[in-house]
Amino acid sequence: MAALSLAILATAGCATRPPPSGSGSFSYSQILSTVDGVTGVRGVSTNGGPIAVLTGTHGNVMGYGGSPIPQLTTTAFLYQGPVNARSIGAAATQLIPPFPDAVNSNFYGPNTRAYNPSSIPKGSVRAVGTYGPSLALNKGMIYLGPVTGGGTWTSIEVPAHGGSSVVGGVSACGTDAQCLVLNTIPHSTMGDLVVGNYDLSSDLTTGNAFIYNMTTQKWTLLDLNGSMDAGTTLYGIWQNGGDRSPNYTLVGGAVDPATGISAGVIMNYNETSGAISNVTYLNEGNPATVTATTHVEGITSAPGGYMLAAQGANLDRVYVRVNPRTGVFGTPVWTQVNVQGSSLCTATVSGVPTTGQCLFDSADTVYEGTVMGTYIPPGAELPNTYVATPVRR
C-alpha cells in the first residue's frame, strides 16, 4: 500500500505529459531584486501554474572563490508571484523573527495550503529556516502565517543528548558530555515533517541529518550506513499520496558506501513506522566513477517520478522515475544547467565578451522543470537569483 501511495501524488495533475529527457536547453534570466537569493519553492496549486511561493535570504553572504566579501546582516524573505522572467525586480517581503538573538535569519523552504490544507490555514504559508547572532551559529525556526508577515514563529533545536523528544532516545553527541549542537538548519517542510541537518561543537566538519515531526514534536536522527557523523544532509521533502499520507520521499547528500565519496541521495520514509527504504545514491552521469555530486537540493513531482536540483562539479536538473509498486528508484536522467555559459555570467575580457565570469553559481530548487539558484554576477560581491526555464522545441 505504501508503494502505491508513492505514485499517486507524483503523477497527479501531470500524467498526460511525458517524462523529461536528458537533452535540452534552458533560457536564463534574473528574478527578484538584487541580493535576493532564492532557496526554496512550492506551488500554490497542485495542478501547477506560474504562481508559486519562494523562500530565500536578502543580503545573502557568499564566501566563495576566495573573494573578500563583507559580512552583512541577512534577512529571511517570502515571495508569492510568477516564477519567470516577468518577476525581475519584484520585491520580496522581508520578515524579522521575534527572537532576541535573531541578528541574521534565512528561510530555506516553504509549503502551501494547496498541499496541506489540514495544517496550513487559508491565507497562510509555512516556511522553515534559521536565525542566530551570527552566520555560524543557527537555531531552527518555523513560520506559519501570511506571506506579508504577521504569523506565528516557533524556535526549534536538535537535542544534544537525547531524551524523550528523540526517537529511540538517541544522543546526537554520543557520550561527549561537553558537546553542544551549534547549528540546527531546517531546509524543507511538507505534511507534518521538517527535514534538515545539524552540526556539533565537537566536530563542525561532519554533521548529520534530522527529521522533525511538528505534530509529535519528536526528532529522528539519521544513521545511514550505521553512522551519525558522515556528513549526511536532507535538503528536500515530498509527501506522496496527499495531505494525510504518512509516505514521503526525501533528498539530500551522503557518503556513497560504494565509492567513499559524497553523492546525492534519495530515499523513502514512512512517518508512522519510521522506516527508511530504497536509499539510492545519485552520481552525476550515473556511473559512480564519473563525478561526485555533493548533494541534491530540491524535489518536486514529475510524470512517473520526481524532478530534483543537484549541485556538485556541475549544476543539474535530475529526473528520477519511481516504480509505483515497489517504490524503487530508476536510473536518473541528468540535464546540465549552464548558468556560467549564459549572458548572466558574461563580461568583457580584453575587449571580448567572455562567458564563465560569475564568481559563484548554484542550483538550489526546482519547480515544474524550472531550476532556480543564486549567482554572483561579474564584478559583483553579492548574489542574485536566476531562473533556468526549459526551452520548448
Image (tube, rainbow, N blue to C red):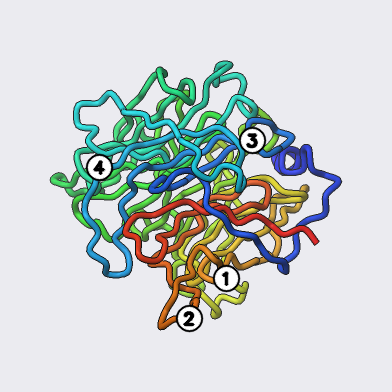
Locate the N terminus and report the quarter of the image it occupies. Answer: top right
Residue positioned 20% across, 26% down in the render: 100
Q: Amino acid at mark 2?
A: Val
Mark 1 vs mark 3: give the one in front: 3
Spatial distance from mark 1 to mark 3, Cα to Cα?
30 Å
Spatial distance from mark 2 to mark 3, Cα to Cα?
38 Å
Residue positioned 19% across, 39% down in the render: 133
- Pointer 1: what residue? 284
Q: What label sits on residue 51 in the rendered view? A: 3
Spatial distance from mark 4 to mark 2, Cα to Cα?
36 Å
Q: Are marks 1 and 4 in contact (CB under 8 Å)?
A: no
Nearer-N-terminus badge (2/3): 3
Q: Nearer the viewer, residue 216 or 89?
A: 89
Q: What label sits on residue 352 in the rendered view? A: 2
Q: Are marks 4 and 2 in contact (CB under 8 Å)?
A: no
Nearer-N-terminus badge (2/1): 1
Q: What label sits on residue 73 in the rendered view? A: 4
| Figure quadrant of residue 226 | bottom left
Callout 2: few (<14), some (14-19), or many (20+) C-alpha neighbours within 10 Å?
few
Locate the C terminus and report the quarter of the image it occupies. Answer: bottom right
- Residue most extreme to the left: 178
Nearer-N-terminus badge (1/4): 4
| SS class, disc 1 | loop
**Residue 95 visible in the shown view:** yes
Residue positioned 35% across, 24% down in the render: 154
Callout 3: few (<14), some (14-19), or many (20+) C-alpha neighbours within 10 Å?
some
Nearer-N-terminus badge (4/2): 4
